[in-house]
Image (tube, rainbow, N blue to C red):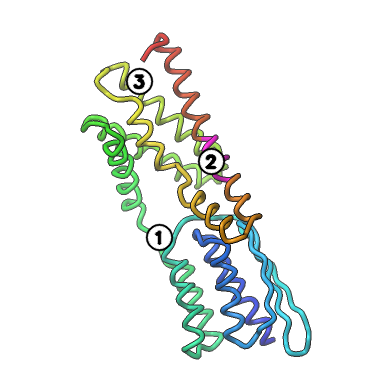
Amino acid sequence: MYTDNIIHIAADAGKIMLENGGETYRVEQTISMICQAFGFKDVENFVTPTVIVLSITNKNSETITTVRRLKNRTVNLKKVALINDLSRNLYTNTLSMDDIRKELHYINNIPAYSSDASLISSTLTAGFFTLLFGGNLKDFFISCFIGLLITFIARLFDKYEVNNFFSNVCGGLISSSIAVIINHINPSFNVDTIIIGSIMLLVPGLVITNAIRDTLSGDLLSGISRSVEALIIAASIAIGTAIGFKVWIFILGGTL
């Protein structure tokens, strides 16, 4: 029973980290540290972006294995940091099983930023990226509007569990369509900077970073998986943007 409790606690901790943007090597390290803090030295765990396999051999030479399947992933690095701190604190502070479970439950249920805060942040992020890439103040406001629409559509798709591929296609489509239409109405707007600034909301920055870090740390399977995921996301953005360009340029007469 003691071994069962430890293996489930460690697996749940790893799952929380992986679901919220933790790198593969960090998840494996954290799982091992939790098990070793309770005296289990023979620990093997295998982590990919979608599954965790953990195996522990106890003092009676009995091997116990558990699996955690990940279906939803997001980005909340605060949870990753808190789980990381918890695993290290186990070496210096004696915590009961119930205390650890309560801490994991608390971390797992930390609320994300409010909907309004996320919406405002996404809106301003698109606008400021446009300024960063050389846009003017008028481009800034158009990008803010596009960022607002992209965020709203993404939430709507999440609500109805629409595949992320189609969500990104729609994001790119919205960005290029609005930019082309606005430029047709008033040629003083910069189509390129508006689109680039807007689609930065969709660019898989953390996925690319983790893919590189996993590859460099020797986790080749995870590195390749994340790289393919990043390529698919980039392709979906490009497809949506291209469709918006082609359709509206054709409708508007073939010129910007």
Image quarter for residue 188? top left
Q: Position of residue 163 (x, y in %)?
A: 57, 42
Tell me the residue at 37%/31% (across/down).
195
Which residue type does callout 1 highlight?
Ala
Secondary structure under the numbered disc 1 in the rendered image? loop
Please name the residue that numbered disc 1 is placed on.
112
Contact between marks 1 and 2 (CB within 8 A): the answer is no
Q: In which image quadrant can residue 186 be found?
A: top left
Q: Is 49 drawn above or below residue 254 in the view shown?
A: below
First in sequence, mark 2 or 3: give its number.
3
Judge the density around disc 2: few (<14), some (14-19), many (≥20) Cα neighbours within 10 Å.
Answer: many
Q: In the rendered view, tell whether residue 102 sits above or below residue 210.
A: below
In space, the residues marked 1 and 3 are separated at their CA atoms by 35 Å
Q: Say above or below: 156 vs 196.
A: below
Q: At numbered mark 3, what does the secondary structure look like: helix, strand or loop? A: helix
Label 1 crowd bin: few (<14), some (14–19), many (20+), radius 10 Å: few
Q: Which residues are magenta?
A: 229-236
Q: Is residue 233 magenta?
A: yes
Q: Reply above or below: 183 against 68.
A: above
Position of the N terminus by quadrant: bottom right
Whether label 2 touches label 3, CB < 8 Å: no
Q: Which mark is residue 122?
A: none
Residue for point 27% across, 17% down? 187
Magenta highlight: main SS: helix
Q: Earlier in the sequence, mark 1 or mark 3?
A: 1
- Which element type, helix, strand or loop, lies under badge 2? helix
Q: Which residue is mark 3?
A: 181
Report which residue position mark 2 lands on: 233
In the image, what residue occupies the spot 31% across and 20% down?
183
Tell which circle, 1 or 2, labels the residue nearer the N-terminal end: 1
Identified by mark 3, the residue type is Ile
